[in-house]
Amino acid sequence: MKINNNDQPKKAIIDSLGRSYATGRRKESVARVWIKPGSGKFSVNKKDDLISYFKRESVCQMIKAPFIVTSMLDRYDVFATVKGGGLSGQAGALAHGISRALSSISQDLHSILRKGGFLTRDSRVVERKKYGQHKARKKCQFSKR
């Protein structure tokens, strides 16, 4: 039986360049995130700005939410590669990865992010299509006569 202790953050994995690494997931998207002390720059898939990659300000706010909650917005630079899924899933994966990387740095940040729900992986995925039906839930048209 596996016991999962969510009260303790994982030990910080810090490489020779001073970066902390974490992986975030949402739907079909996987984000590999490195954060290091800096001035608050974001680089996603080699694009130097969030707006240039995601295009929508609401999605960018969702990604910055872990930094805003912990008031660390201008203290860390983020380098990330995101694969799979659409823009919403990629943004969720990126926010999850940023949260995990921040929580591994400090125990105080871990408790703040845990209370905010940023460390919980959103397990909702697309429901599969069933045979004999048009879609996952949509049935064929019923004819009484």
Image (tube, rainbow, N blue to C red):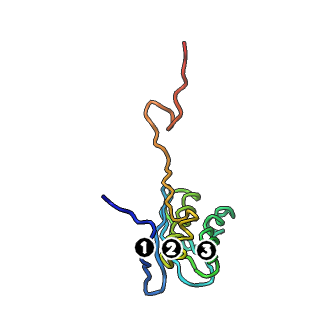
Can you say whether 105 is above or below 84 in the image? below
Number of marks in picture: 3
* Amino acid at dot 1: Lys
Label 3, residues with CA under 10 Å away: few <14, some 14-19, many ≥20? some
The residue that appears at 50% across and 76% down in the rendered structure is 107
Can you say whether 11 is above or below 63 in the image? below
Label 2, residues with CA under 10 Å away: few <14, some 14-19, many ≥20? many
| Image quadrant in which the C terminus is located | top right
Determine whether the residue tagged by mark 2 lies in a helix, strand or loop: helix
Label 2–label 3 contact, CB within 8 A: no
Residue 86 is situated, as x and y percent measured from the top left of the image, at 55, 56
* Amino acid at dot 2: Ser
Gap in angstroms between the C-alphas marked 2 and 1: 8 Å
The residue lying furthest to the top in this view is 145
* Amino acid at dot 3: Thr
Question: Which residue in the structure is indicated by mark 1?
Answer: 10
Label 2–label 1 contact, CB within 8 A: yes
Determine whether the residue tagged by mark 3 lies in a helix, strand or loop: loop
- Sequence-wise, the earlier of marks 2 and 3 is 3
The residue that appears at 56% across and 76% down in the rendered structure is 78
The residue that appears at 48% across and 85% down in the rendered structure is 18
Question: Which residue in the structure is indicated by mark 2?
Answer: 103
Residue 97 is situated, as x and y percent measured from the top left of the image, at 51, 68
- Sequence-wise, the earlier of marks 2 and 1 is 1
| Image quadrant in which the N terminus is located | bottom left
On residue 70, the disc is 3
Frontmost residue, 128 versus 49: 128
Is 35 left or right of 52, judged from the image as shown?
Answer: left
Frontmost residue, 32 versus 118: 118
Label 1, residues with CA under 10 Å away: few <14, some 14-19, many ≥20? some
